[in-house]
Structures are given as structure tokens and as C-alpha cells.
Amino acid sequence: MMHYNPKRTANKLQKVVDAWQTIRPAKQFASMTLEQFKAQVQPSLDTRGQLVNLHNQATDSRTLRRQADAASLGLAQLVVNGVKADVEEGENGSLYAAMGYVPKNARRSGLTRKGSTTPPVTSTVAKAPTA
């Protein structure tokens, strides 16, 4: 199977059409008129157009998703804040933990004590005897 570059193929098709149309529009090649050739390669060009449309739709969908996610995360944060403020649930409740947060009473203090480290090893270089 021959490897091909889709961009190069599109450029090549366009060059053939442009040159044929500009220089010999009335002449037939390979038993085809220019219009017949265009009709034969149209599915290739149409597919490229579909891909451009799909790419644009995907870009738009990603933008819409990003905006919706930002709004959803803000709403979720409001709910979490409501759970934290609830008298029955609070920051130490199981609901807060089930939402993926560390309950306040399970958090570490943050205090760290650095233990004594061993002194750095100093290397001694033997001096060469002087003659």
C-alpha cells in the first residue's frame, strides 16, 4: 500500500484542475473533459470539506464543554460548602469524605520535624609525593 499525505493530495488535485482550466480547458485527457475529471474527484474534495466541518464542530464542542465544566465545578463547590456548613454533616462527616475530601479531623497538622542528618562525607585527596 502506498503512503500518501492528505494535504499533498489535495494540493496536487487542485494544481491539476487549475493548470488544466487555465491552459487547456477545452482539451480532453485520459478520455475525460475537465468537467468529467472534476466530477470524478469531487468525492475526495467533499470528504475534505466534511472533515473541516467536523473539526470545527469538535473545536466548538470542546469550548462549550470547558464553559459548562467551569459552571458545573462552581456549582459543585457551592454544594460542598453547604455540606461543610451543615450542622449535621460538617467537615468531619462521612458525606464530606465520600465527596473526595479529607475530613478535618483526619488531616495532618502540617508540622514536620527534620531529623538530624548525617554530616556530609568529605573526600580527602591524597597528595602526590613531591620529588
Image: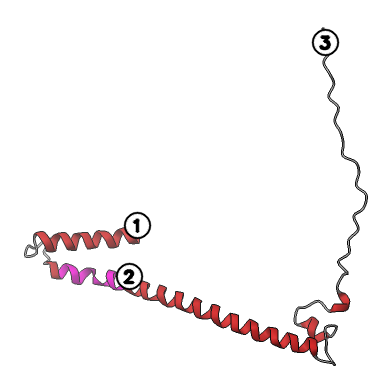
Is 12 on the left-hand or right-hand side of 113? left
Secondary element at image label 1: loop
Callout 3 amino acid: Thr
The picture quadrant where one finds residue 24 is bottom left
Q: Are marks 1 and 2 in contact (CB under 8 Å)?
A: no
* Label 3, label 2: how far apart the Cα atoms are: 81 Å
- Indicate whether residue 51 is drawn in magenta: no
State the residue position of label 1: 4
The stretch drawn in magenta includes residue 37? yes
Question: Which kind of residue does numbered mark 1 sit on?
Answer: Tyr
- Identify the residue position indicated by label 3 in the image: 130
Q: Nearer the viewer, mark 3 or mark 2?
A: 3
Q: Secondary structure at mark 3?
A: loop
Q: Which residues are magenta?
A: 36-48
Q: List the single residue furthest toward the right.
A: 116
Q: Quadrant of the C terminus?
A: top right
Categorize mark 1 by other alpha carbons within 10 Å: few (<14), some (14-19), many (20+).
few
Q: How far apart are the two marked residues, 1 and 2, measured between alpha carbons?
A: 15 Å
| Mark 2 lies on residue | 48
Secondary structure category for the residue under label 2: helix
- CA neighbours of label 2 inside 10 A, class few (<14), some (14 to 19), many (20+): some
Task: Name which residue lies at 45% across and 74% down.
Answer: 59
Residue at the extreme top of the image, as rendered: 131
Q: Nearer the viewer, residue 34 or 2?
A: 34
Quarter of the rendering containing residue 70: bottom right
